[in-house]
Amino acid sequence: MSDANHTSTRPNNRPTRKKKSKSPVIGCLVTFFLILLVAGGVGFYFWYEHQQEIDQEERDFAVLTGKNYNTADFEAFLEHYPNSIHRAEVMERLAALRRLHATWHNICNSQNVQNFRQFLYNFPDTESEYYVQCLHKIDSLDWVNACRRMTVASLSGYQQLHPDGEYAMAAALAIDSLREAEARQREMMADSAFLQAQIHGALADTVAIW
């Protein structure tokens, strides 16, 4: 057989390239995304908890901004939310409430009606728990003072100050009674004067006869 037709059987000595494995790259990517997912979940959890805390703080603050006169609620808010954005406002309201309570406790047993009128002037809040009590004290003390004099003028003065007062009816009845008594007294004085005139006339006639 000729050399031309002879097929070379020599082995190919060139090195074959091995395909690089993608497994480590994919593993790193998966790990990276897992870390991102966990970090995102943790971040969302803390954000959600923080948002819930803020929402609860606003709800608690809304309770205080209503007609709340309980200092304990304000103190509890400041203790629970020491860094609240409403801290200054809550402290100011708490100080005002403390002044309100202290002033009322100082005068609540007073018999001087002017103390209660001054209280309403200083604390005009009609929703205050002391507002109605203060009006009652003023009404009662004005009635007591009117009864001490027990004249038409003093009772009429009470009526002018308290046309719808607790003792308005009693004042009207007392005035009617006083006026009736005054009328009877005038009648008695007129009768007495007439009787005295009659007596003097009779005496004069007797003297004239003698």
Image (cartoon, rainbow, N blue to C red):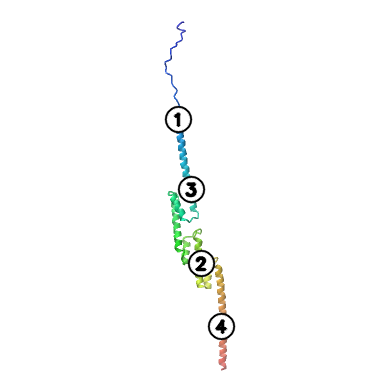
Marked residue nearer the N-terminal end (3 or 4): 3
Q: Secondary structure at mark 3?
A: helix
| Circle 3 Cα neighbour tier, 10 Å, few/some/many (<14 / 14–19 / ≥20) | few
Query: In whole angstroms, how far apart are the C-alphas of marks 4 and 1?
Result: 128 Å
Q: Residue at label 3?
A: 56
Spot occupied by residue 200 in the image (x, y as percentages of width and height): 55, 87
Q: Quadrant of residue 176?
A: bottom right
Residue beneath the point at 45% across and 30% down = 27
Q: Quadrant of residue 35?
A: top left
Question: Viewer-proximal residue, 25 or 88?
Answer: 25
Which of the numbered marks, if any, corresponds to residue 27?
Answer: 1
| Circle 4 Cα neighbour tier, 10 Å, few/some/many (<14 / 14–19 / ≥20) | few
Instruction: Please name the amino acid that badge 2 sits on.
Output: Ser
Q: Residue at label 4?
A: 192
Mark 4 vs mark 2: give the one in front: 2
Query: In whole angstroms, how far apart are the C-alphas of marks 2 and 3?
Result: 45 Å
Spot occupied by residue 144 in the image (x, y as percentages of width and height): 50, 69
